[in-house]
Image: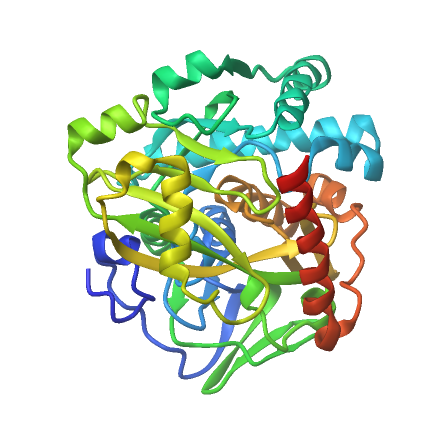
Amino acid sequence: MSEAAYPPSWYAASAMPLPQQPALEGALEDADVCILGAGYTGLSAALDLAEAGYRVVVLEAQRIGWGASGRNGGQAIVGYGCEQSRLEGLLGQEAARVLFDLSREGMDLLRARIARHGIPCDWRDGHAHVPIKPRQAHELRAGIVEMAQKYDYPLQWWDRRRLRDELESDRYLGAVYDPASGHLHPLEYAFGLARAALGAGVRIFERSPVVELVRGNRPRLRTPHGHVAADFAVIAGNAWLRGVAPELESRVMPVGTYIAATAPMGEDRARALIANDMAVADVNWALDYFRLSRDHRLLFGGRASYSSYPPPNLRGVMRRRIRAVFPQLDDLPIEYLWGGYVDISLNRAPHWGRLAPNVYFAQGFCGHGVASTGLAGRLIAEAIGGQSQRLDLFAKIPHAPFPGGRALRTPLLVLAMAWYRMRDALW
């Protein structure tokens, strides 16, 4: 696929082309629902709503899957960006259990959509969280017991020797292996959702940034060259939302994260590197995460940035991080290097709900959006259809704005992250 419409990445270079959709010109007054954002959340809600008989319009500022949905690490993990203990503290054990079971439903929905719509997105089963420090190993093993006792969720502990059978690295002390999680080609999955939505009658307009949300009995989303009026609006802009809903923007922080794709290493070498083709992530605050591509590259992510600029010497930094995990790959050059934003909430819990009785939103996926975005879209569609109980539970999670406003929130977060990186290094 031509990369011109998307930031250069291995995903953009390897995805099956999707025809460009028109830009919005003029007024549309016949929609039941208008959705801002053609990423996983918006497309998932659009698909469910169209299949329920609603007339749905999606407005996308760039191209389908242009943001985090088309650039992320591809790791689909049960759960949310925060630990279950955080949800227990915010809502109590019973509600936390319901939320966790919903995250499992989100994973089932992801798999079902891939199968039902024949989405060629390279799905692979299996994910491992790996500790580097003894403290981390102890916490992970305790977490396995807690997840089994409180949440009836089976996880496997692999000691160092067992992990070494699957992963050709001496860096880690073991692994928590989850066979129910996995990984995929993010942009191909976004394209697959879009094809399904278009087939269900959804109208998608690309190159149509929303510049204003006009609230009222029939909310209106205005673009530079037109507007859409509908009975309901859905805001699914996440980290790229700008000036449309300030009360949402203040409650998430766009954080840059980066991915390198090496040159292909060949099938035999790739199978020796990660024998079972699982995805892997360490448990540092500033984590590394990696997996194999279908053409036997290593896709390696990490190195967060809290400004709008990539870190200096990013290629050299990524090479050093890869070498720390896989010194045997020192001969492999990096052929692709790209980044994007994830939307982090202050408590790292999902931020989903309503701005008004007819305006819905979902954000705050905190790097765990591959599966939970589909769940968010489904719950919003249910609420528009009159069944809001499940979305209402998420709306009860309290969310505070980042301190400091636009001017100071980034420096304050940088200081906090420096503390967590020091903690990772010392303990």
x 42%, y 60%: residue: 339
Q: Is residue 250 above or below residue 304?
A: below
User: In this rendering, does residue 359 appear at all?
Assistant: no
Q: In this orientation, which residue lies closer to the viewer: 164 or 392? A: 164
x 48%, y 54%: residue: 46
Side (left or right) of 157 relative to 162: right
Q: Is residue 192 above or below residue 164?
A: below
Point out the image quarter for the N terminus: bottom left
Q: In this orientation, which residue lies closer to the viewer: 160 or 181? A: 160
Residue 85 falls in image quadrant: top right
Residue 336 image offset from top left, x and y in percent: 28, 57
User: In this rendering, does residue 26 appear at all?
Assistant: yes
Residue 185 falls in image quadrant: top left
Side (left or right) of 268 relative to 289: left
| Colour pattern | rainbow
Side (left or right) of 204 relative to 211: left
x 69%, y 42%: residue: 423
Q: In this orientation, which residue lies closer to the viewer: 54 or 86? A: 86
x 23%, y 51%: residue: 333
